[in-house]
Amino acid sequence: MYEPKIVAFFCKWCTSAGADLAGTSRLKYPPNVVGIRVMCSSRIDPEHIMAAFRNGADGVFIGGCHPGDCHYQTGNYQTLKRITLLKQMIEDLGINPQRLRLEWISAAEGQRFSEIIKEFTQQVKNLGQLKSEPLQ
Amino acid sequence: MKRIGVFICHCGINIAGTVDIEKLTSQIKEYPNVVHVENYKYMCSSPGQQLINQQIMDKNLDAVVVAACSPSLHENTFRTSVQRVEMNPYNCEIANIREQCSWVHDDKQIATDKAAKIIKSMVEKTVLDEPLMPITVPVNRKALVIGGGVAGMQAALNIANNGYEVILVERESSIGGHMAMLSETFPTLDCSQCILTPKMVEVDQHPNITLITYSEVVEVSGFVGNFKVKIKQKAKYVDWEKCNGCGDCITECPINTPSEFEQQLGERHAIYRPFPQAVPNKVIVDMDECIQCMVCQVFCPTDAIDFNQKDSIVEQEVGAIVLATGYQLYSLKNLPEYGGGEIEDVIDGLAFERLLSASGPTQGVVKRPSDGKIPQDVVFIQCAGSRDPENHMPYCSRICCMYTAKHAMLYKHRVHQGRAYIFYMDIRSGGKDYEEFVQRVMEEERVVYLRGKVSRLYEEDGKVVVCGTDTLTRRNVEIKADLVVTATPIRPIEDIDQLSKLFKISINQNGFLTEAHPKLRPVESLTSGIYLAGCAQAPRDIPDTVAQASGAASMVCALFSSDQLYHDPIIAGVDEDLCSGCGICVGVCPYSARTLNREKGIVEVNEVLCEACGACSAACPSGAAQQRNFTDIQLKNMVKAILG
Ligand SMILES: Cc1cc2nc3c(=O)[nH]c(=O)nc-3n(C[C@H](O)[C@H](O)[C@H](O)COP(=O)(O)OP(=O)(O)OC[C@H]3O[C@@H](n4cnc5c(N)ncnc54)[C@H](O)[C@@H]3O)c2cc1C
Ligand code: FES
């Protein structure tokens, strides 16, 4: 059975804290997602996402603070713009944009975090393995 | 090659229960750059820390990765610890294999595999981590306290008594907050005004406190130690330099309008002070009501009335901020089941405080609002909107059990033959001498406690009929009451959203300001240099409010104890060789930390202003703006490590 590989980027202030809360609350979710904690979702460069797809990720997840809640005021708006554009671009490159997900998850939303991760994992599972040629 | 040590914590069975520590240890040993791997039961304990430090020396390690709980818990612990053996703290990283791994997976194999990925990706980051030195910043040892309720006053006094300057900003014309409205306070029944007024005067007269009332902060910039704020002083139409508080203008003003302070149960004039003991003892004009008859001007002995006054802005620089903006009561309008605010004789707790107060609209005689009769049957409804996740507020407002008991007792003291009934869900009287107080109310005052909810109430023949169920006797009860007092939820102030945006601190799902840690950092906000006190953070009574305010004040004093502060150095700089001077990063920086030097054709950074979000690093097309220790190469290597 195919198990998707999913790379996630969480901002430190909200989503990573939300993921921690999911942990503290012992809410189980699939292990396919492995997170990288950055200070803000706005640190994520489309380059990092493409690097994930190129190196075998079947899905990429980005979690930031709710609009208006970004610890750095406007970071998540930058993220939203970038990801929206990037989704169009990857579609042109032949990658289903559903493999890229941006969600706002607050530090208080442990439950929501685990549910979204479950749901996204299932979604990527349904899409099947992403076949891309690994970069030499 | 960098020499990295990896230290895996069992966290008792918290990690070891789901992660195969031995297998993980041997897997990580094989990973490039890792020269030493060790595991231990409690890495954060003192022997655990010593173990790491010993290995740093013995194995000559350049950097360490501690695989343990969330970095939000112990990153600081380990970074501080490794410094004892001369390791740069930024060469110590945390791999979170507890909250984001062992606690969320059941299968040992799966959890172990995932833990390995998490650790490997952290090793990749660590390989390219640079040693960094904290950036030092001067601290402006002056504090700003927002809100002049008992919380704000306490914080201001404590800071001022430590010898630091304080600016206290209050949006109303007088300080005092809600405590000034209370009659007597549980559990000792001392008169609220009597214990509060001296404090208000002390605040006003303290040489270190500058009191700015009828004002609000409208702009905040800067960072810990160096905030800049703009304070809007609303036009009072009275020159306070001249006003001596004699009140002649008030007596002469022909306009009467419901008083906010009296909860609409009494009246005030268009020129007024909210209550007689107001501090500062000065008047303001309510322009919405004023008809500009100029009578006040005629009678003012000091010529203080000035209808040309405009709002003005003052700028202040401060090093720390305490937010003490308090609460409001959930409006009865939101509770159609209790008349929706339409039934005159259904009032909330604060209104009842005013009816009980010797200086209130009825001079402390309990008279019902509709016809001024002394009520003989009074029903108190607790949890009127609290603990009701379906319809209203999900949380417990924490003080209502106590003030309702107090209300019933004070009512019985004033109307000896009167009957008091309290509908309650549970009695929560956790506080020093609180349970004893409630017992006294039940036994000595013969107040009838009915366990159950009120299903509905309606007006009939000059009475309010209250229908409910006593769940203990399983009987329906119907009480024809003269007056109903509801304990409605404690809510944050109306514009808490704006406040949270203004100060860039978060609020929880119910709108209360979020503390940095629910247990260990209850008086700090997540934004360094901004502290929380009182009901703005959560509903609480006066003793708890004062304790928290003193705590916040101590944090401010601790910050002020040194004139230098250390700023996190994981900022984004500029590689001058790569920067093309396009200026894209300047536009995305929320802190104006980056400026384009047109002469040199490159961007320059004010390191102290950089808060390290990394937005510029992602936006920079040439890779010149690299966030330290979160560089593009590091992030890509982390991605690759995860994908294996
Ligand atoms: C009916 C009732 C009875 C009570 N009885 C008791 C009792 O007997 N014993 C007891 O211990 N506790 C009692 N309490 C609780 C008590 O009122 C609170 O614990 C206490 O008042 C909290 O103080 P605070 O300073 O946090 O808030 P507040 O008293 O609300 O003060 C906040 C202040 O901040 C100001 N402010 C708000 N926003 C801004 C802004 N943006 N800029 C500037 N200023 C701003 C407000 O105008 C106000 O002056 C009772 C509460 C109620 C509702
Ligand atoms: S800090 Fe969470 S998105 Fe910016």
Image (tube, coloured by chain):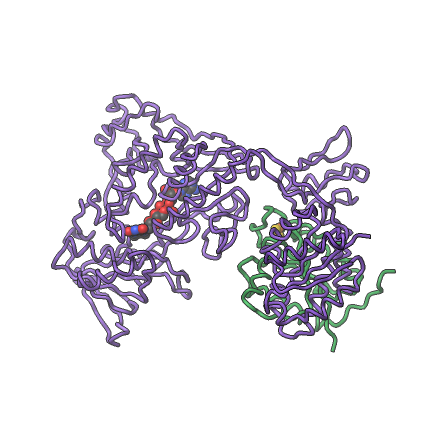
Chain colours: A green, B purple
Classify residue B467 as left or right of residue B163: left
- What x and y, as percent, mark residue B16? 63, 69
Compared with B292, A68 (above or below) is below
Residue at 41%, 41% in the rendered image: B155
Q: Is residue A89 visible?
A: no
Q: In the image, B272: left or right of A53? A: left
Residue lying farthest to the left in this orientation: B417
In the image, residue A136 sits, relative to residue B553, either above or below, namely below
Judged from this view, the residue extending furthest toward the right is: A136
Q: Is residue B317 visible?
A: yes
Question: For residue A25, what is the image quadrant?
Answer: bottom right
Q: Quadrant of residue B132?
A: top right
Residue in the foreground of this view, choosing between B456 and A71: A71
Q: Residue at left 73%, top 67%?
A: A5
Residue situated in front as seen by the camera: A13 or B137:
B137
Query: Relative to B138, is B374 above or below?
Result: below
